Amino acid sequence: MSDQSKSQKTLDKETYQQPDNSGHFGQFGGRYVAETLTSALQELEATYRELWRDSTFQADFDRDLAHFVGRPSPLYHAERLSEKLGGAQIYLKREDLNHTGAHKINHAVGQALLAKHMGKTRIIAETGAGQHGVATATVAARLGLECVVYMGAKDVERQALNVYRMKLLGATVIPVTSGSQTLKDAINEALRDWVARPEETFYILGTVCGPHPYPEMVRDFQSIIGREAKQQCQEMTGKLPDALVACVGGGSNAMGLFYEFIDDQDVKIYGVEAGGLGIESGEHAARMAGDRKGVFQGQRSFLMCDDDGQITESYSVSAGLDYPGVGPEHSYLREIGRAEYVYATDDEALAAFRNLTRMEGIMPALESSHALAYVEKLAPTLEKDQVIVVNLSGRGDKDIHTVAAIDGLALDGKSGLQG
């Protein structure tokens, strides 16, 4: 398949055409920002519209995905896990094997190419689990650009390994101590930075959230996941999957998998949010469960808020899912009934983390473990000749300290495992 034909598969979807020209997915999405950011977003949208249909840009993007990221990522049949669960056959889309260890590098490469074309000299980003920060620091190092990453102070502490990786790559990591000290506060600080220095700065946003055109643009850069998975599943099983499952924080890995299959109505789609300590506890990040909508960080979507519309704190054991908003396209897919959104608790995700590690020799990120937790419920309800494709969005090395702490252990660089 030529580079150009790969690109056209994304551009020529037959029936599903979202968002509209104003960046709305039905009632969701849009661009709700201060006037000072409007011109920067208009410049970004115009550049993206020009280059996304440019054959030279597409060739550069596909080449970087192949030779820098290491695509295509494999589709792996988890035979022992499938046998244990006793139902559908489970296939893992191995985004954890990408360069830098997660799906985030896909859109970081695409946005970095845009920044290079626009002549920007400075890259900024936000990060939660650190995977997007590492991906951004990586592409900035490759291009020789200054890189600043905003990260909630709480996440700096629980993702220390990725913080050090970013610093080794030459990035400046700024801990954010306002609010809940997590991802939403890091995004707030990144937006403030961009408002102050828009002429020289490109903001590489890490998910399908934020003001238009970010939700559409990040989705398009991530849609390589679904295009590969569709082809690989047909080659390995002779048919399309019966179900797709992916975790949803902001929702970039999930939209990357789902988008290619939206027109395939026989393929069921499940997004898995973070149920934290349980919905009844209030300590969770399951935005869809609360059925509340509003405007947050430049977009309209489902979100976590109180009766007065004020954003409430989210919680999850996984830093990458600990966010009170969700990408507007996920809200749209839920509203039109094309996708179902469920949740997994911390305990269920941790159990799934251990099961995959011990049964398949693959250590998943805690974010991905939420998707695996739902697969453990879904697979036994399906027939053995049915197929589930789950997006393994990242690897779990970064979460070892978190899991060890839950087990009552401390990992010390000098003395090893301390219990």
Image (spheres, rainbow, N blue to C red):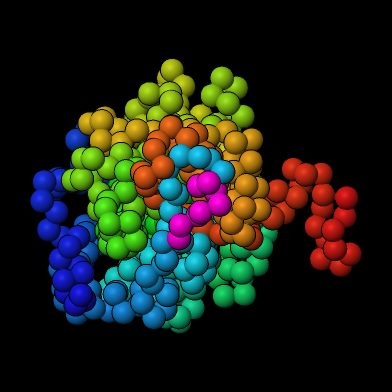
Please give the name of the residue rendered at 23% of the width and 78% of the height, measured from the top-left corner.
Answer: 59
Q: Is residue 77 magenta?
A: yes
Q: Quadrant of the N terminus?
A: bottom left
* On screen, residue 406 above or below 295: below
Please give the name of the residue rendered at 56% of the width and 52% of the height, measured from the top-left corner.
Answer: 80
Q: Nearer the viewer, residue 46 or 65?
A: 65
User: Residue 205 placed where, x, y %?
Assistant: 39, 57
Identify the image quadrant of residue 219.
bottom left
Q: Is residue 202 visible?
A: no
User: Residue 283 placed where, x, y %?
Assistant: 59, 28
Please give the name of the residue rendered at 88% of the width and 55% of the height, measured from the top-left corner.
Answer: 418
User: Residue 277 placed where, x, y %?
Assistant: 62, 29
Span colored in magenta: 76-83
* Count of marks placed on residues: 0
Secondary structure character of the magenta stretch overall: helix
Q: Is residue 93 visible?
A: yes
User: Residue 13 placed where, x, y %?
Assistant: 14, 54
Identify the image quadrant of residue 162.
bottom right
